[in-house]
Amino acid sequence: MRDYIEKFSNVKALAIGDLMLDRFAYGTVDRISPEAPVPVLKIRSCKEMLGGAGNVVANLAALGCVTTFVGVVGQDSEGRRVAELLSKVQCWNRLFFHPEAKTIVKERMIAANSHLLRVDKEERLPDLSPIWDEFFAAASQAIRSADVVLLSDYNKGFFTPKTTQAILKLCREFGKPAIVDPKGRDYSKYNGATFVKPNLKEFQEASERELRPADPNFRTEAIAAAKRIFERYEIENLLTTLSEYGMMRFSRQNPDDPRQIPTEAKEVFDVSGAGDTSLATFGAALGAGASVEEAMELANLASGIVVGKLGTASATAAELRDALDAKRAAAERAIEAATAKTVRIDAGENAVSAAPSEKTSNFGRRKLLTREELAEVVADLKRRGKTVGFTNGCFDCMHFGHLNSFAQARAECDALIVAVNSDASVKRYKGPNRPIQNETTRSAIVAALELVDYVVVFDEDTAEPLIDLLRPDVVAKEGYSLDRWPEGRQVVAYGGRAVELKRVEGYSTTNLVERMKRADEAKEEKR
């Protein structure tokens, strides 16, 4: 991944699209206006930046790419200012000054980290006929020379069906990947694009389906939405950004097997331009020779950097390298802890040895992870050639049978993940009187075990969505043959192993509950 970042300086990236001028007024608010109940902003500083497709250019330049831009602005002072800013980021540009257009300007008033107001000055771009021939010739030359072409559509009038199809046709003729950041419900003008990159809202609008990433059936619904778009439009791939839920890629050739990666954002100050950063980094990575999944990971990493900044921002190549180094260091610490020592569960003929995580010696210390955090850890474990194991259950009343199962499962892998059913999913499965202990207690007890490396709580009826995200090498379960075990079949289908664990007879939570009930009843009778 680091090698691709080093190659960004050789990537010839072309951006085309709706260009704007972003203005920011920064200040403080310490009183309310006597004229109206509004805050009074005392301006301390002002800043002008490239906006719209210009922010894609700024991001490409920050990554170190050889950047070119072809676009249209108005024949006005704002248009000239945009030209100056393009030169400052060392972008070769072929900027057309339309005599009838007005350059779009967006002004933001900001106090501390809070946006107070945004003022937009904009009119849709008029017909390009007066400059079309000259524009088409410049676009053709730029596309021919590019490694990757990014189309940034802000629905301001530049990307009409005519202009969009003309550009995409040139990309196909010259064999250049075309990545579109779309707007609107109708994607017909994007027919022929290599990638179309909608956000969640745009994905819903284009597919006419309501989608909630937190729902257990989101993956199924998202696949149906992607298929609907593929049926309607000639698009090769969909790359959907899901805000705090990461990013998801669907291919026309295999829409039933999407790839989802978690978000990298830790603390969010502002989301201005995060989509532009994602687009630029994804395109740069593809241009550097990265696979689609590797490009997704770098794009997600870059987005996580910029949402922690205020205003329209970029992620630099140095920041990406630092973020990768931080992830690698965290993974190394986790892996060293996960393979540090060996324990033995002694149950006579059922004795099993396993090598648990050293980090389990402290009660629940950073072993209870979100699924997004866990996906990062698993990805790094796999890069190091470690075998990842997975098992799941309610674990309502911990007993020797559970310990025996964990020991057997741990013997099959380098790191064992235990997924614990949430309270809601236990009630759906076991009935209204269960669980006896809440999910916080149950997951903490599991995390305290030396046999277990990582714990995650899940709310779905099955662990299949988690397995789809994590792709463990081994899935283990007690008492389930493969024909009654969907998670096992799922792992086997992509080349993993499903291990049926040996049961220690006489141990079960249900038996424990019944024995406690009988004991209570006996006490009552004696009274």
Image (spheres, helix red, strand yellow):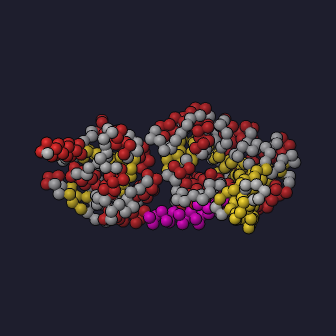
- Coordinates of residue 392 in the picture (x, y in percent): 33, 47
Taking the image as shown, residue 416 lies to the left or right of residue 351, namely right
Residue 310 on the magenta span: yes
Occupied quadrant, residue 313? bottom right
Q: Is residue 507 visible?
A: yes
Question: Residue 509 or 84: which is nearer the viewer?
Answer: 509
Main SS, magenta residues: helix
Question: Residue 399 or 473: which is nearer the viewer?
Answer: 399
Residue occupying the point 85% across, 57% down: 77
Q: Residue furthest right?
A: 99
Residue occupying the point 36% across, 38% down: 428
Taking the image as shown, residue 89 lies to the left or right of residue 370, namely right
Q: Residue furthest front?
A: 527
Occupied quadrant, residue 158? top right
Q: Is residue 93 visible?
A: no
Residue occupying the point 67% across, 57% down: 115
- Coordinates of residue 284 in the picture (x, y in percent): 61, 55
- Coordinates of residue 142 in the picture (x, y in percent): 73, 51
Occupied quadrant, residue 415? bottom left
Q: How many marks?
A: 0
- Coordinates of residue 396 in the picture (x, y in percent): 29, 48
Residue occupying the point 48% across, 44% down: 214
Q: Residue furthest top?
A: 231
Residue 65 on the magenta span: no
Question: Residue 321 or 50: which is nearer the viewer?
Answer: 50
Image quadrant holding the C terminus, namely: top left
Highlighted magenta segment, given as a residue range: 308-330
Taking the image as shown, residue 256 lies to the left or right of residue 16, namely left
